[in-house]
Amino acid sequence: MTINKIAGSKVQFDVVIPVELFKKSLDEAFEKKNKEVEIPGFRKGHAPKDAFLARFGKESLYEEALNTAISETYYQAVVDNAIQVCGYPKIDIDQSKVNDTEPIHYTVTVSVTPEVELGEYKNLGIEKEKVTVLAKEVEAEINSALNRGAMLVKKADDAVIENGDTVVFDFEGFKDGVAFEGGSAKDYSLEIGSGQFIPGFEEQMVGLKSGDKKDLEVTFPEDYHAENLKGAKAVFKIEVKEIKVKETPALDDEFVKDQKIDGVETVDAYKKHVKETIKNRKENQALEKAKNNLYMQVVKNAKFELPEDLVEEEANYSLEQAKNQAKQYGLTLEQLLQYSGGGTVEEFKNARKEQAKNTLSLRFVLKAIAEIEKFEATDEEIEAKFNEIAEQYKLTIDQVKEQVSLSAIKEEIVTTKAYDFIEKENPFVAPKSKKEE
């Protein structure tokens, strides 16, 4: 069989379906279709083949038979010729020439693992940021912990509302003098200055006391989610029930003990602990950033042609996952994206395409490095991986082996070795000083 390489890391080849194989597929198609139709004079699924063909024609079986025959012959062609397929095949067949008296020819176009020409992947001199912890970072972390431990305490009855206070109040909204749906609540809690309500609402509450009533005049934003309220002027009638102020605990040994940190019982020990925690976090972040830069450079140094349709498949898969996630929350994908930071569906897909390009590129380059360095998965490593999966998902080894392919296990082991190898062969270096630059 001749395999022609074409642009985009694809190959094209012709496959032949022998007459006998197609006849066998037609028989299988008849057995399946016969169970789905009713023919007068026969029980469902028990009509003889001649009666079926007389009523529906042999051609009614072609599509089902072709699918079976193509699946079998395509798979066999891939295995026999060791074609490293990494995408869904495109099948071209002349339907007018399909019959059971002569061989059937079809053409396959499919993406394959790209040929990677590796560049340098050792001693690349990737920098890892030097980590420092500033006093203001420690202070901010401690203040954050103190704020988390803060309690809301009722203010005096004659106290006024200030920014940062939490107010319990009733409200009802009116547009053109008519109350609108979803515009009222009882005993609602709102932190003034948090920006939870539309512009101008919270600001007009500053200075009020418990028991005060007031009409707040506001204008809904033009991009408000409710169509009938976009850009509309409205009046909210409110009544203040209670005003609460946040009381933050003092930074003392009692507060520290309440944090229940092993071996940390004093303010000084707590400050050291917080500083060490920040340092470890920043070290991990610096290490991850350096690793990502390393992987990107290894990929950048290599030459290969990434299958675009595979990138598209990966991006579409991410898109479908996001749609399913939105569905679970009773939202459209557009709404989910809006609530999680904005952006359009097209922007989301483009971001996923870029992510897919990076992920696939690294996968192919790691595979090439593993082949050059002759990394293999030993029997012991394979068995250990099966055991690890079984333990993680509470399955038996046999269940895991039924559900997870051996090739996938081997690929994971070999890929991990390639990762470890790259990191071992590329010790990170300290950033250059401005003078050195």
Image: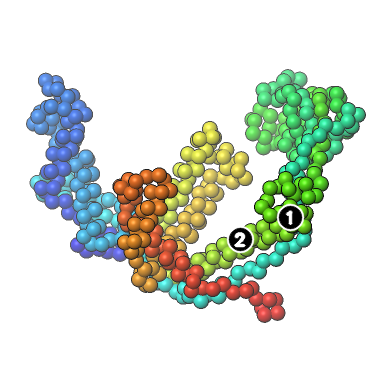
CB within 8 Å, label 1 to label 2: no
Q: Is residue 414 visible?
A: yes
Q: Is residue 6 visible?
A: no
Q: Amino acid at mark 2?
A: Gln
- Mark toward the viewer: 1 or 2: 1
Q: Sequence order check: which comes first, mark 1 or mark 2?
A: 1
Q: Quick one: label 2, few (<14), some, or many (20+) residues within 10 Å?
A: some
| Residue 30 x %, y % | 15, 35
Seen in the picture, residue 205 relative to 403 is either above or below; the reply is above
Find disc 2 in the rendering and name its residue: 285
Seen in the picture, residue 237 relative to 366 is either above or below; the reply is above
Residue shown at 72%/24% (left/top)?
Answer: 185
Residue closer to the observer: 291 or 108? 291
Task: Judge from the rendering whether residue 242 lies leftward or rightward of residue 231; answer left or right.
Answer: right
Residue closer to the observer: 379 or 253? 253
Q: Amino acid at mark 1?
A: Tyr
Residue shown at 23%/58% (left/top)?
Answer: 79
Picture colour scheme: rainbow
Q: CA distance from mark 1 to mark 2?
A: 22 Å
Report the disc number at residue 270.
Answer: 1
